[in-house]
Image (cartoon, rainbow, N blue to C red):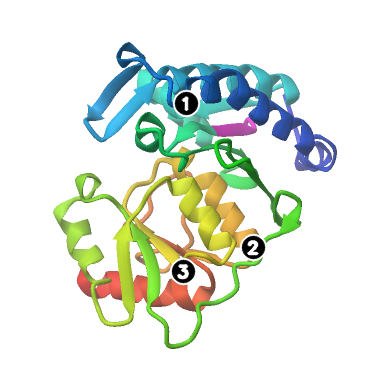
């Protein structure tokens, strides 16, 4: 088992490219051969018609679970599909072992419908802190990596989120109404004001990437599942952005956050979005 943070630092200094290789191989072996080729029996519903899972999700997560734990002995995996099968698996995020947080296909609805707007998300966390993340959009052949304290890159080019252009409406991606409580719906209505242009989100991981590259001003999300947020939040942070919950605190992957929360291109925008959410709540 990994015993100290220096060992994790050594891993991140020398093995991040190995993680990228594992993610690319998982996509090549289990995801892309099924893209636009899914049969009806390879698609299932989980909580409802908007919450889908496919053989690609399951097989890619199995591939990554084996590959990632082999790269970092003593580590554990919290994957979306494993947690669906056994919710107690999620508790490992708050455990002592280094934890890989995996969403094998983020944007499964898009994947099922033949839309390239999906990605594979992997984050490595220690003691509840995300230390590194990998975001791969295989249908677009885009790969983003973030290492805490060392910045974020997209296909080797540094990412800079920048700040919204003064006087322009803020472009904000928000949670799908099907996944919000009545209280959260009221909070999100706070964004329907002059100077803000909210829209429904697609793949959370790709929305975070859009913030990191300065193409989207922010998000306002109402759910906590770490596999959707861990990788992207670090990507945003390392590109110069910020994230805040409804109480003005950074989002915690270990849970207990005041929702909705935001991630944005800069701290001023994050604070503006939180103020609007609070006013609507």
Q: Residue at x 39, y 19 (%)?
A: 38
Q: Evaluate whether residue 273 shows in this view.
A: yes
Extreme residue in the bottom direction: 167
- Which residue is nearer to you in this view: 112 or 82? 112
- Which residue is nearer to you in this view: 239 or 98? 239
Residue underneath mark 1? 35
Q: Main secondary structure of the magenta part?
A: strand
Extreme residue in the left direction: 182
Secondary element at image label 3: loop
Q: Residue at x 60, y 32 (%)?
A: 99
Q: Quadrant of the C terminus?
A: bottom left
Q: In the figure, 191 relative to 10: above or below?
A: below
Residue underneath mark 2? 239
Precedes in sequence: disc 2 or disc 3: 3
Q: Evaluate whether residue 96 shows in this view.
A: no
Q: Residue at x 31, y 66 (%)?
A: 198
The magenta segment is: 97-101
Numbered mark located on residue 217 in the image: 3
| 1 or 3: mark nearer the eye | 1
- Which residue is nearer to you in this view: 109 or 274? 109
Precedes in sequence: disc 1 or disc 3: 1
Q: Is residue 116 left or right of residue 20?
A: left
Q: Is residue 208 magenta?
A: no
Precedes in sequence: disc 1 or disc 2: 1
Q: Quadrant of residue 4?
A: top right
| 1 or 2: mark nearer the eye | 1
Extreme residue in the top direction: 41
How crowded pointer 2 is (Cα within 10 Å; few <14, some 14-19, many 20+) is rated as many
């Amino acid at each position: 088992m990994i015993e100290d943070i220096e060992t994790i630092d050594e891993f991140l200094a020398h093995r991040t490219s190995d993680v990228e290789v594992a993610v690319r191989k998982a996509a090549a072996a289990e995801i892309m051969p099924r893209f636009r080729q899914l049969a009806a029996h390879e698609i299932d519903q989980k909580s409802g018609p908007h919450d889908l899972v496919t053989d690609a999700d399951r097989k890619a997560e199995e591939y990554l679970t084996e590959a990632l734990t082999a790269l970092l002995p003593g580590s554990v995996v919290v994957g979306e599909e494993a947690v669906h099968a056994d919710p107690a698996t999620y508790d490992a995020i708050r455990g002592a072992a280094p934890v890989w947080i995996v969403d094998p296909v983020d944007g499964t609805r898009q994947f099922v419908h033949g839309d390239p707007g999906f990605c594979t998300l992997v984050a490595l966390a220690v003691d509840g802190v995300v230390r590194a993340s990998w975001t791969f959009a295989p249908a677009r052949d885009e790969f983003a990596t973030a290492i805490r304290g060392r910045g974020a890159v997209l296909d080797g080019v540094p990412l800079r989120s920048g700040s919204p252009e003064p006087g322009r409406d803020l472009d904000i991606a928000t949670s799908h109404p099907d996944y919000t409580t009545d209280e959260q719906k009221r909070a999100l209505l706070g964004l329907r004001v002059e100077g803000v242009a909210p829209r429904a989100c697609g793949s959370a991981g790709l929305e975070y990437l859009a913030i990191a590259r300065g193409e989207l001003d922010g998000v306002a999300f109402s759910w906590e599942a770490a596999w959707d947020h861990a990788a992207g939040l670090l990507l945003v942070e390392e590109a110069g952005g910020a994230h805040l919950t409804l109480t003005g605190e950074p989002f915690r992957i270990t849970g207990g956050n005041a929702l909705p929360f935001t991630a944005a291109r800069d701290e001023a925008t994050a604070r503006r979005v939180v103020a609007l959410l609070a006013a609507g709540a």
